[in-house]
Image (cartoon, helix red, strand yellow):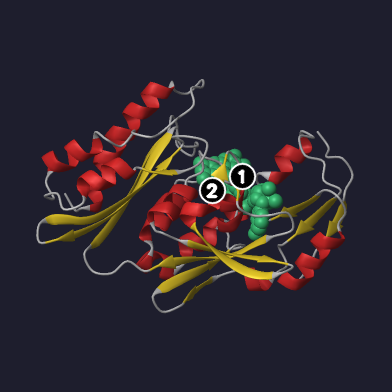
């Protein structure tokens, strides 16, 4: 279908983009790569008065080193994230998850920031951002603010982004010595969305797990941390048995949906199995 008519703005700076949003009327939509937005406009599930296209805003693109963190611009495409040496070195979990996102064409147009701002619970990057304790830098007319990943995802397809705000970049802390990470995704066919997936970051110390952070994909209306499993892992021996015992808690506090792909209880089973695998691999077992 053809989208309803809309005004189009193509700013070249964040300030211009904020102004275009302010001037855009009642219903303004920000567009990144259009990979999620254009399909809903074609179905006329969204009919914005104005589309503000961020594709010419150079300051939103690329990855930079910022000392104890790497910073990924919101308009960096999935393909650029995958090709980036800083991501490979300091945040391999992001590269590993991004490799599983859709196909080459979508990865060429779709963006890191767009995938996070869209906040699809089946999306692969929100759970990764949670596991890495990433921080989101958001710009609005009143200035900039920083939001922890734990506070960014509010509800189904809903983030803390207010009307008129732009996600500018995401700060990802570098993991130091002893950390290992792994992304374990269960999908029916290659290049499909996750039925369930688990992002694990684990710090080993003296044969034990000192700290574990586990992000769950598609286990509720928002991405979630598997807090009970994390607590069970803290201080546990880095052994297959201890990890299996902790992973048994992975579905606690989750509320996955039932759909054509999987019933809720099957998703909870998958969360336990995938957590065991993801934590084991992250811990080097
Ligand atoms: C066929 C197909 C398969 C896919 N498979 C997967 C998959 O397996 N795993 C996965 O994780 N994802 C998957 N995706 C989604 C993909 O990851 C896209 O990155 C995602 O759809 C976002 O697209 P985009 O960056 O083009 O954002 P857009 O579609 O342009 O925008 C998406 C939403 O975010 C808002 N937005 C975008 N950028 C900003 C910003 N900087 N600030 C504020 N708001 C913003 C827009 O207003 C819009 O509401 C798939 C997409 C397609 C089309």
Q: Is residue 120 left or right of residue 20?
A: left
Mark 2 Cβ inside 8 Å of ligand 1:
no
Residue 141 lies in what quarter of the image?
bottom right
Q: In the image shown, does 74 or 173 lie closer to the viewer?
A: 173
- Can you say whether 279 is above or below 93 in the image? above
Question: Contact, CB < 8 Å: mark 1 with mark 2?
Answer: yes
Mark 1 and mark 2: Cα distance apart in space: 6 Å
Residue in the image at 50% along x and 46% along y: 101
Which residue carries the number 2 mark?
153
Q: Secondary structure at mark 2?
A: strand
Give the percent coordinates (x, y) of residue 35.
65, 46
User: Circle 1 sits on which residue?
Assistant: 158
Q: How many marks?
A: 2
Image quarter (top left, top right, bottom left or bottom right) of the N terminus: top right
Residue 214 placement (x, y as % from top left): 34, 48
- Res. 13 in view: no
Residue 86: x, y in percent?
42, 70
Secondary structure at badge 1 equals: strand
Q: Is residue 195 visible?
A: yes
Q: Residues within 10 Å of mark 1 (few under 14, many from 20)?
A: some
Q: Look at 38% across and 34% down and name the residue there.
A: 253
Mark 1 within 8 Å of ligand 1, using the beta carbon: no
Q: Choose top left, top right, bottom left or bottom right for residue 165.
A: bottom right
Residue name at image x 45 percent, y 29 percent: 256
């Amino acid at each position: 279908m053809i989208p309803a008519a809309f005004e189009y703005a193509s700013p070249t700076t964040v300030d211009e983009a904020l102004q275009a949003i302010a001037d855009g009327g009642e219903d303004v939509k920000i567009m990144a790569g259009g990979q999620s937005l254009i399909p809903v406009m074609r179905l006329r599930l969204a009919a914005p008065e104005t589309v503000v296209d961020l594709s010419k805003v150079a300051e939103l693109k690329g990855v930079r080193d910022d000392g104890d963190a790497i910073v990924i611009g919101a308009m960096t495409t999935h393909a650029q994230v995958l090709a980036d040496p800083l991501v490979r070195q300091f945040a391999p979990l992001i590269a590993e998850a991004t490799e599983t996102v859709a196909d080459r064409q979508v990865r060429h147009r779709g963006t890191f920031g767009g995938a996070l701002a869209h906040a699809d619970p089946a999306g692969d990057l929100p759970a990764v951002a949670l596991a890495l304790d990433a921080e989101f830098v958001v710009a609005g007319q009143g200035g900039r603010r920083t939001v922890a990943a734990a506070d960014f995802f509010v509800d189904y397809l809903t983030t803390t982004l207010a009307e008129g705000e732009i996600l500018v970049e995401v700060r990802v802390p570098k993991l130091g010595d002893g950390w290992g990470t792994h992304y374990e995704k269960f999908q029916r066919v290659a290049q499909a969305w996750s039925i369930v997936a688990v992002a694990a970051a684990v710090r080993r110390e003296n044969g034990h797990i000192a700290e574990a952070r586990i992000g769950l994909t598609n286990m509720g209306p928002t991405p979630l941390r598997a807090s009970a499993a994390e607590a069970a892992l803290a201080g546990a021996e880095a052994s297959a048995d201890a990890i299996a015992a902790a992973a048994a808690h992975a579905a606690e506090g989750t509320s996955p949906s039932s759909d054509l792909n999987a019933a809720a209880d099957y998703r909870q089973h998958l969360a336990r199995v995938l957590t065991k695998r993801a934590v084991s691999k992250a811990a080097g077992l």
